[in-house]
Image (cartoon, grey):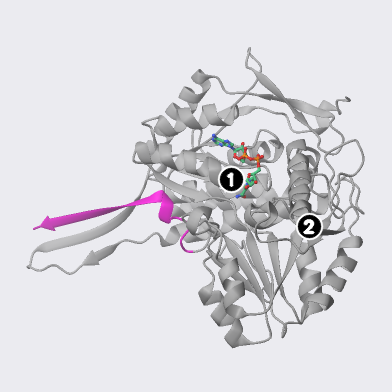
Amino acid sequence: MSVIDAGSYEKLALFIDGQWLSGEGRREQEVTDPADGSVLGMLPHATQRDLEAALAAAQRAFGEWRHTSPLERGKILRRVAELARERAEAIGRNMTLDQGKPLAEAVSEVRASADHAEWHAEECRRIYGRLIPPRVPGVRQSVTREPVGVVAAFTPWNFPFNQAIRKIAAALGAGCTIVLKGPEDSPSAVIALARLFDEAGCPPGCVNLVWGIPAEISDFLVRSTIVRKISFTGSIAVGKQLAALAGAHMKRVTMELGGHTPVIVFSDADVESAARLLVQQKFRNAGQVCVAPTRFYIHEQAYDRFMATFLEEVERIKVGNGLDPTTRMGPLAHERRVSSMLSFVDDAVSAGARVECGGERIGSTGSFFAPTVVSGVADSAQLMKVEPFGPIAPIARFSEFEDVTARANGLPYGLAAAVFTGSAATAQAAAASIESGMVTVNHWGLGLAETPFGGVKESGVGSEGGAETFDGYLVTKFVTELH
Ligand code: NAD
């Protein structure tokens, strides 16, 4: 295994109370490039003392940060946005190295994430209270919203920069401070982000970044009496564990968990345009996107046209190293995703499905998996029941509205859904019937800073973004006075 020039990759470190920490006998783990397995750097793990220091710093900083004016908080968040845009190329390159996505996607993730910092800068000026008319003269009844306190946040590897900035901006905008554990597999973007907050003038202790064994870190932080709120993005299984632990300690949670996005294409849709758009969305970030289209239900009268265009587009996807500008799909973020894809395909085939293209690993170096289309997949196959989180598109037919909405609603997931139809009445009926936190109709419009992002059912609790973004970070205080 080769080690790339250390100077050209992010310097891996913990960030606690405004200090960058590494070495000093801390346990370390290798960070590797999923395109070729080469070692990019060594990531230090937080010791128990580091975690205690991070919590103490966050608690101390909260004492002052909670009283800063929204204008002051907004100024720092805006500066973070400017710095993110200025450094998008360099941050994106390192993200391609440790996460695998094509460089253009990585750079645009950083640029688009700047919007989240700006949105929170603006929206924090609108954290209002209210006065309630009293029953008797002389009484004044006020309701204010206060920051909940120190936040412990856990972010995943699929959109390392985006997922972390959403949580940090929401916490800081609300007046909270944060201890964040990023994704150990793909840490560079989160480290770069902590640097941006530091350089933008964020006081020491407001943002703390730790790494380690995920279950050990979360167990320690969630149990701490200093932490008042937990925010997690990741799998439903882990989300349930963390929510249960948070519940045992009566702590608030925001949970952004997995989805299994049903896509319904009715026969009156612009079928070919839908197919082309869905290929882009399906294979973006190699399908490792919680809202990616993952179950395709195509009306039987549109099925052949949809399939022909979809396959034609998929066959044009060039798979390769994300640093190659001609690459449209990079490797999966780690080897365990490849094994998972192989077992989804095997299971679907044994349940009677047909592999229309792909279905196998590419090459023997790196975690590459071919863009895959599978048809005739039984609703009982794992692929139709469990979020694939990878580049596999299972395509099925339907004929009746009630049948397809029942199938869309038949799983415990409820994150996103997509509908394609030429009829406003069908669109509205489908959007109203689908049990999902987000529905996109005839285009792909999810994840903007000004729109809420979140799931229902087992896909999560709470929303990030939109006017709802601070709800999970604020508590309500009622004061009644007699004068
Ligand atoms: P995983 O469940 O092991 O890990 C997912 C993320 O959660 C990782 O970033 C990991 O570091 C973190 N994590 C794991 N255990 C944790 C714990 N006890 N405490 C705190 N954090 C913890 O799965 P994986 O193999 O890394 O990813 C595959 C699955 O994760 C997918 O099937 C998908 O459902 C889910 N996922 C979802 C999202 C999302 O945006 N909702 C993002 C990434 C992964």
Q: Which mark is residue 283?
A: 2
Whether residue 177 is visible to the viewer of this picture, yes or no, is: no
The magenta stretch spans residue 468: yes
* First in residue order: circle 2 vs circle 1: 1
Q: How crowded is mark 2: few (under 14 residues within 10 Å), some or many (20 or more)?
A: many
User: Residue 118, percent across and down?
Assistant: 58, 57
The magenta stretch spans residue 100: no
> According to the image, label 1 marks what residue?
235
Cβ of mark 1 under 8 A from ligand 1 = yes
Quarter of the picture holding the C terminus: bottom left
Q: In this view, does 229 lie to the left or right of 316?
A: left
Please determine whether, in this image, residue 459 is positioned above or below residue 203.
below
User: Residue 474, percent across and down?
Assistant: 38, 51
Quarter of the picture holding the N terminus: top right
Residue at point 46%, 61% (across, down): 468
What is the quadrant of residue 354 in the picture?
bottom right
Q: In this view, does 89 lie to the left or right of 158?
A: right
Cα separation between marks 2 and 1: 19 Å
- The residue nearer to you, when weighing 124 against 396, is 396
Q: Quadrant of ligand 1?
A: top right
Residue at point 54%, 43% (across, down): 237
Q: Which amino acid does label 2 sit on?
A: Phe
- Tell me which segment is drawn in magenta: 467-483
Circle 2 sits in a helix, a strand or a loop, which is it? helix
Q: Which amino acid does label 1 sit on?
A: Ser
Q: Is residue 7 left or right of residue 246?
A: right
Q: How crowded is mark 1: few (under 14 residues within 10 Å), some or many (20 or more)?
A: some
User: Residue 240, percent across and down?
Assistant: 48, 43
Residue at point 83%, 68% (across, down): 310
Whether residue 254 is visible to the viewer of this picture, yes or no, is: yes
Residue at point 52%, 22% (across, down): 50
